[in-house]
């Protein structure tokens, strides 16, 4: 496993993720997110914004999009101050 590029802070998930997404998949996505792997569903401009947002002098909110094996997406969002990371479904946003 690669080293994390930033701190996830407190990790939370929505009720929909808790009730419908395999926990092992969620953990794997959180690890990928922390390593700077923004997922298969993230657009190039989102990836570029995330990469720039890793700068500790000008941190930005980080948003990853992972394709779920059963279909649909799992989003992972870390706030700009790295205080909280949330795993959510797009419809939770």
Image (spheres, rainbow, N blue to C red):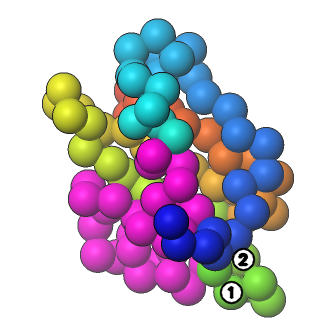
As rendered, which of 67 and 31 lies closer to the eye?
31
Name the element at disc 1.
Answer: loop
Q: Relative to 25, say whether 7 is above or below.
A: below
| Neighbour tally class for label 1: few under 14, some 14-19, many 20 plus, Cα within 10 Å | few
- 50 horizontally vs 55: left or right: left
User: In which quadrant of the rendered view does residue 21 lie?
Assistant: top left
Q: Are marks 2 and 1 in contact (CB under 8 Å)?
A: yes
Q: Is residue 73 visible?
A: yes
Query: Which residue is disc 1 drawn over?
Result: 55
Estimate the x, y position of residue 30 in percent, counting from the top left. 54, 49
Residue in the image at 79% along x and 43% along y: 10
Tell me, yes or no, if residue 93 can be seen here: no
Pinpoint residue 51: horizontal percent, then vertical percent: 51, 81
Which image quadrant for residue 5?
bottom right
Magenta region, residue range: 28-53
Say above or below: 20 vs 34.
Answer: above
């Amino acid at each position: 496993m690669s080293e994390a590029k930033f701190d996830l802070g407190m990790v939370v998930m929505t009720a929909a993720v808790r009730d419908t997404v395999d926990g092992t998949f969620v953990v794997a996505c959180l690890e990928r997110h922390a390593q700077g792997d923004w997922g298969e569903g993230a657009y190039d401009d989102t990836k570029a914004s995330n990469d720039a947002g890793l700068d500790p002098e000008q941190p930005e909110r980080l948003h990853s999009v992972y394709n779920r094996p059963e279909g649909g997406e799992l989003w992972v969002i870390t706030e700009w101050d790295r205080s909280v990371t949330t795993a959510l479904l797009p419809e939770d946003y």
